[in-house]
Structure formats: structure tokens, C-alpha cells
Image (spheres, rainbow, N blue to C red):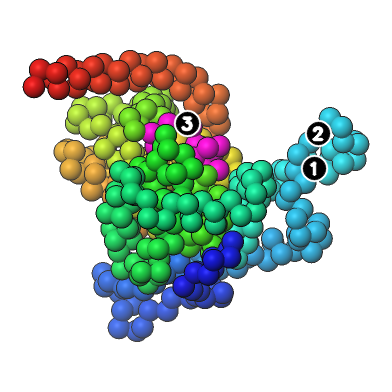
Amino acid sequence: MYATESKRNMSFEYQAQIINYRPSLHTRRANLTVKFQDIYGFSVEGNVDDVNVLNEVREKVREQGRVWWALEASKGANWYLHTQVSSTLKASLKLSALANAITLKRLIRKGIPPVLRPKIWFALSGAAKKKSTVPESYYDDLIKATEGKATAATKQIDHDLPRTFPGHPWLDTPEGHAALRHVLVGYSFRDSYVGYCQGLNYVAALLLLVMKTEEDAFWMLAVLLENVLVSDCYSNNLSGCHVEQRVFQDLLTQKYPRIATHLEALEFDVSLVATEWFLCLFSKSLPSETTMRVWDVLFYEGAKVLFHVALAIFKMKEDELLLSHHVGDVISILHKTTHHMFDPDDLLTVAFDKIGSMTNTISKQRKKQEPAVMKELDQRFRRLNSLNDAS
């Protein structure tokens, strides 16, 4: 499927138009299951109410598209790149850049139209800048250099390929597996310290679906791991991820003490669900378009977005969670909620309008938790070594 030129275009093409899901007359009852494909090719199962929600979301996407196109017509195709307020700018240009920045943040939180996502993500995330620092042939040279090489990372990647969104009409094909393998193996050689961590396969797979080329997906993965997320989230000991889980627990206690107290009484550890959310960036939990809406903001505002979204999920189900009696009940509530969260606006409204700013709090909590996590991981490592020596 792929040629050897620098941009390898995927053969699986998604419909350019937004699809309306129209349940037939005999399914117009909320207790009947409806199956269909979303715009990214994933099979979705829900009731008629879910379909109606999706139709409403599709109309909102159309409306947002018209807003973005109008701005491109009035401000220029790359207006969103002119949002940096520099001291060297003239006063009039500063005001223009500030206005653009305010407009852009608001627009991104309302969603980037799917057709514009590749170029907006690539520009605003820093991926384009990162790519510009290396020779044009960097990606192709990297893929050629890694052909036939076997490492612990490549073996795990090969094991995970068929388990990454099985049944998807493009990802679960030889072409899809090959593209995903190129991106993951390529990055494992670019950063041997990270190598490969389970969870990255789901992230890279969605990046491929959005970006349409292996090379662009590769650079989005690179900027995500090297700039957007905190360091060591995907290292061998997952120290960064452990820190984020501690921070999330603290934030849940501060923001929603009733929920935190009840879950503690049930001996429920929030990392049972939140670890996958943070490692997979919600790609295994939320419907694809809702995940993309989260990523729209993630690539522009940074890793704090993950905390906002995770807290919002708990907040939206506060009443049900407070009535739960077992750990299994909590997991079931959260699993069902995330998998049927078809309206991104419901989630993101709570995430950003109801929770409030947490940027400084998150930074302080990370600094507080990191020494404790590193000490605990070091003690665990020493125990393992002593057991190995004893045997």
C-alpha cells in the first residue's frame, strides 16, 4: 500500500461528509440496540436515544465548520498561527494576536472540524516545528534503518498490533497493521529510553486515522511524548504515570470530597480506571469523536486537560457513585458512562466551566508527589533485586 516517498498515504478513506444516522421505524424504541459506524470507521452500539444524540452532535460539527471556514475567509487560512503576543510586536499587532488567541481557545474547546484537524493539530501542537528541525528524509530513513531489527519493543509491538481496535475496517488489516508498526517501531528507535509502552498502540492508531499519513502521525506521537505530556509517563517504571495518578487522587479529594470519601470507604483505588484513561488518553474509553474533542484541547492546552476530563466524568456520575456499594459497581458505572458519552459538549462543559482553573494546583501537586513516587519505586526495585539475589 505504501510507496517509498516521504508521505505514505493511507488507502482507507473516510467519507468527507458528515453522516446522519437514521434509525429505521422498527428501531424507534429506546430499549432496542442500534449498530452503526462512526465517521472514523468504528462500530458503535447504542440505543435510539444515543443515535439522536449523535445526530445532534453531527449538526453541531457542521455549525462549527461554518464558523471555522468563515474565520479563514476573513482572517486568512493560517490565522490561528498568529496568536503569540510578543513584546516586539506593535501595539495594534499585539491586540490582534491577543484577540486571535482568545478566539482560538474558545473555538478549540467547541471542537475543530474533522477535515481541519490534521493541519490544526500539526501546527498548534508543535509537531510541525519539531519536524522542521530534522532533514526532510528523517522519517523514511528511520523506517528503512529499523527494517528487520528485533528488540523487546518490536516484539511487544508485533504482539499488540492485532489487539489494537480489532474489527476496525482499516486498522485491523495488513495495511493498517503495517502503518501502525512503522510509527511505533520508528518511535521506539527514536527514543530508546521510552521504547514502547502498551497504550501507545491505541494512541498512535487514532493519530493515524486523523493525520492520514504515517509521517504526520509519527511527529504527532513525538510531540505528544516529548512536549505535551509530562516526562516518564511511558518509561519502564511508568514513574510519570504514577505521579499523575497521585495528583488525580488529590484533585478528586479537593474538588469532590464526598465522592473521594465514599470511594475510600469502598476501598476503591481511582487508578483502577484512571491509569488506562491517562495512558491511552481516553482512546479506549470514550467514543472516537468525543476522544478527538478531548485531544483538540489537549494538543493546544496541554496535559492538564486529562485531569479536567477525568474529574468531569466522576462529577457527572456523582449521584450514582454515591449510591454504589461495591468496587465492581463503581467500575461498571464509569465504564458504561464513558462508552456512551456521545455528546462531547456535555463532558467538556463540565470539564472546563464547572471545575475551574487547576494549572497551578496541578504543578504544585506534581512537585509534591514526585519524590514520594520515586522513593517508592526505588524501594520496590531494591526488594525485587534482593529477591533475585536470594533465589
Do the CB atoms of the residues marked 1 and 2 lie less than 8 Å apart?
yes
The residue shown at (44%, 51%) is: 146
Residue 227 magenta-highlighted: yes
Q: CA distance from mark 1 to mark 2?
A: 9 Å
Magenta highlight on residue 241: no
For residue 133, say whether it is visible.
yes
Read off the residue under disc 2.
86
Q: Nearer the viewer, residue 32 or 284?
A: 284
Q: Tell us which disc is closer to us: 3 or 1.
A: 3
Helix, strand or loop status at disc 3? loop
What residue do we see at 91% from left, 36% from top?
90
Residue at the disc numbered 1:
97
Marker count (numbered): 3
**Height in image: 135 above or below 372?**
below
Residue where numbered disc 3 is placed: 231
Query: Which amino acid does the dot numbered 1 rest on?
Result: Ala
Q: Secondary structure at mark 2?
A: loop
| Amino acid type at image mark 3 | Ser
Q: Earlier in the sequence, mark 2 or mark 3?
A: 2
Q: Which stretch appears magenta?
A: 223-235
> From what the image shows, is residue 327 above or below residue 377?
below
The amino acid pointed to by label 2 is: Ser
Tell me where residue 105 appears, x and y as whole percent.
Answer: 65, 45
- Taking the spot 26% from the left edge, 47% from the top edge, the residue there is 333
